[in-house]
Image (cartoon, rainbow, N blue to C red):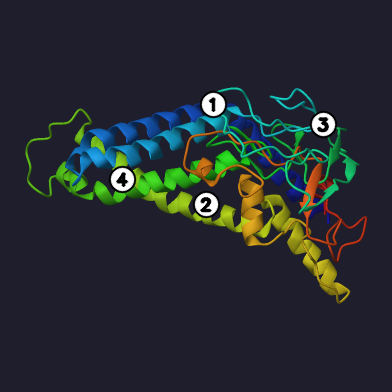
Amino acid sequence: MICARQVFRCFRAVERFGDRVTGAAGPWFVGMAAILVSAGAFAFFEVILPTMSHPILSFFPCALIAANLGFHYYTVCTVRPGFVDDVHPVSSSPERPPEGGPGLFWAKRKGATDHMEGVRWTRALNVTPASMSRCKKCGVVRPERAHHCRVCNRCVLKYDHHCPVRINQCVGLHNERHFVLFMAYLVLATFFLSVCGFQKALDALGFNFIADWPYLTPEILYVLIYMLSVVMCLAVGIMLLWHMWGVVKGETAVESQDHEVYRKIARSRNDNFVNSYDLGKRRNLEVFFNIGPDGYPWYTLLLPLRVPSYTDGRSWARRDGFDRHGGVVAGEELTDEEESEEP
């Protein structure tokens, strides 16, 4: 038992050291990612686009993909995820989410609906106020679905995970939409670069015996960009599918782990666990992206525009007839404190 406790403490120490290292190196990771994305976009428009069948017609959809990629990456890196003890960055109020900012890149809604307990939706949804608890790590009173980030040392509304390598901050309520769209457009951009740039990659490697390379992008740099695009398309594509699977199930990365525990608890007493946030696949997508008949237009998914979350994180849409998860009783919910308990 003593040996197991020492091993546990050793792993915790290594984990905390890794958090400090990645936290300190986070800005460098973001800067490197921005340079690589810019280099890939430049190589595509300089080397690949002129060789396509209809370069002028192809320019506009390709430019739209590049604009969305850059916009959503900038937004997910700069928009705060939604710390529980913060007022909202636009509305300056913890009570209501904003309808949108005055800037050019804020999407406009289709008509107006009344606010209902911090939720921007119609009464067709079953909306209940979130239950509150006090975090034992930072002491803040937080609503359900908020979790404590050990890197930021703060509680985040609808916490998904902390991403030190790509965005150097948490993914939470206010930037999760942009995080998913950033991954989607990154997969789309790298897919087209990988497919359309294959012949030029062979030229750069010398397989086609073409001596002239009349581009500003050096051959070796183009080959490295092409190889990285193939790898990123596959790797990020898998991540995107995993995140989208969580979206259609109405759960975050943290909640997906918690829900597995809840299912075991419910089965132990011959009961079934029911995720009260799961509204059905289509409605889950509409609520997550805040689109649909009562949200923002669907074309906001195709344009580089900011769209706020449908809620302020203190009220949540649930399945009809539920005000909490089914199969779990009060006191059985997991908290962040269990993560630090020693064996």
Q: Check whether the beta carbons of the residues at disc 1 and disc 4 lie within 8 A of each other.
A: no
How many angstroms separate mark 4 from mark 2 (CA)?
Answer: 18 Å
Work out whether mark 4 precedes mark 3 in sequence or the reverse, and give the earlier one.
Answer: 3
Residue 262, percent from left and from top: 80, 63
Mark 3 highlights which residue? 95
Q: Which mark is residue 89?
A: none
Q: Which quadrant of the structure image shows residue 250?
A: bottom right
Instruction: Residue 203: name its quadrant.
Output: top left
Q: Tell me the residue at 76%/37% (across/down).
A: 312
* Callout 1–callout 3 Cβ contact below 8 Å: no
Instruction: For marks 2 and 1, give the one nearer the viewer.
Output: 2
Q: Position of residue 294 (x, y in %)?
A: 67, 46
Residue type at mark 2?
Leu
Residues packed near mark 3 inside 10 Å, few (<14), some (14 to 19) or many (20 plus) = some
The one nearer the camera, 317 or 183, is 317
Check disc 1 and give the amino acid type.
Pro
* Residue identified by numbered label 2: 240
- Measured in 3D between alpha carbons, the distance from the residue under mark 2 to the one under mark 1, in whole angstroms, is 23 Å
Q: Which is closer to the viewer, label 3 or label 2?
A: 3
What residue did someone put label 1 on? 27
Instruction: Please name the residue that numbered disc 4 is placed on.
Output: 193
User: Mark 1 vs mark 4: which is more N-terminal?
Assistant: 1
The mark nearer the N terminus, 1 or 3, is: 1
| 162 to the left or right of 201 | right
Tell me what residue is drawn at x 83 percent, y 57 percent. 1
Q: Looking at the figure, which quarter contains the C terminus?
A: bottom right
What is the spatial separation of the Cα atoms under label 1 and label 4, in whole angstroms? 26 Å
Observer-nearest of 54 and 332: 54
